Image (spheres, rainbow, N blue to C red):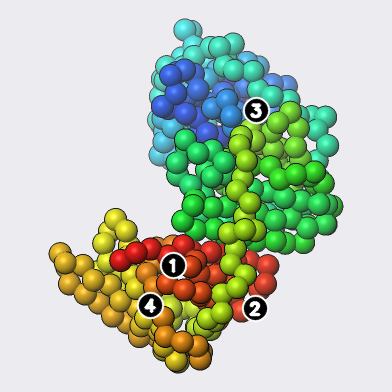
Amino acid sequence: MDFRIGKNELLRGLYLTHSIADRKNTIPILANVLIRASGKDKVLFAATDIKVAMVVSGSAKVSEEGGLTIGARQLYEIVKGLGGEEVRLQRTEQNWLHLESGKTEFKVVGMNERDFPKLPSFDDTTCSKVDAVTLAEMIGKTVLSVSQDETRPHLASVLLESDGEKATMVSTDGHRLSKISCPMPGGPKLASGVLLPRKGIAEIRRVIEGSDSSCEIGIDQGSFILKLADVVLSVKLGEGMFPPYDQVIPKDNDKRLVVAREELVEALRRVSIIASDKTWGIRFMLEKGRLSIEADNPDLGNARAKVDVSYKGAALQIGFNARYFIDLLTEMKAKEVAVELGGDLDPALVKPCDDSEYLGVVMPMRL
């Protein structure tokens, strides 16, 4: 293997693949990126942790075909620090990589490409062309509610539903829920929802982030497939049964307040400074025309912020995790949001006033 490649082209391939490589895995080669030069002008970058796999194609001046695997994060950091515009990569004896750029050179220990796991092929997968901006927006508005608990894979995932005209994404960690539906004409027709695990969702977002074109998505061999330009990403679908989310979304909350979104976010941020850094517990004190947000911490003191709201119902006191509200409201770009409440033990329903297709549910907490 011997080829020359532009630094930015090399950096792009490594940026997209290095986060997939799993340094914590008991199989050392899974921490590597596979680099393979073929033909006269093509180089492939690939990484996998078995559940998520990505292949990125790049352009290069190939002198000798061949491949090698190298520690992904180490190589990414090396290339980031290079000063030249072109980089030469050669495989030498004992699977070492000789890398040269300008007056700088590295010799890095590698591993034989024959030991790298076989990458799945999805050349024959039937994919649907969808808008990448819409897909990225849906992920951004739901990923905040994905559980961090890997022992509950059905909650550590985003549920995707699609009928070919409209797509819905839902996530919940048991304490909050996010749901968004968007038109997606030509999208995949799924008989039932599929689960996209947290790491896979993050990688999908990285690939399509900043793209204003269309991408292709499909389901094949138990995996979600994403194709965008010269990138192919496969994510093994999650297992388990997603909770019946419609039963979680409140439908009878009779206390509705409308408030300026930014004003509410700022009030929550100020008051939460005093709140416990473990529970982020704050209290809503609601009365006609006004919402008081309070936090009490025996180690720090107390805080109160008042926000003008449109509300004519009965007085109510209820506790929440401030961080859940802040995360949700940050994704809602509307000037005003509606918060619908029931009793002091009922979940809150939060919706942008100008978007009925996005909503969040926040469970109350005892303070």
Look at mark 2 in the image and give the residue it sits on. 354
Mark 1 surroundings within 10 Å by alpha-carbon count, few (fewer than 14), some (14 through 19), many (20 or more): some
- Answer with the quarter of the image where residue 221 lies: top right
Query: Residue 16, position in %: x, y?
Result: 56, 39
Q: Position of residue 183 (x, y in %)?
A: 77, 61
> Mark 1, mark 2: which one is toward the viewer?
1
Q: Find disc 3 in the rendering and name its residue.
A: 43
Residue 266 percent location from the top left of the image: 39, 76
Q: Amino acid at mark 2?
A: Asp
Considering depth in this image, is 269 or 281 the residue closer to the camera? 281
Q: Earlier in the sequence, mark 1 or mark 3?
A: 3
- Cβ atoms at labels 4 and 3 below 8 Å apart: no
Between the residue at mark 2 and the residue at mark 4, the CA separation in whole angstroms equals 27 Å
Q: In the shown orientation, is residue 313 left or right of residue 120?
A: left
Give percent across and percent down for residue 283: 34, 73
Whether 334 is drawn above or below 157: the answer is below
Mark 1, residue position: 345
Which amino acid type is marked by label 1?
Answer: Leu
**Alpha-carbon span between mark 3 and mark 2:** 47 Å
Q: Secondary structure at mark 4?
A: strand
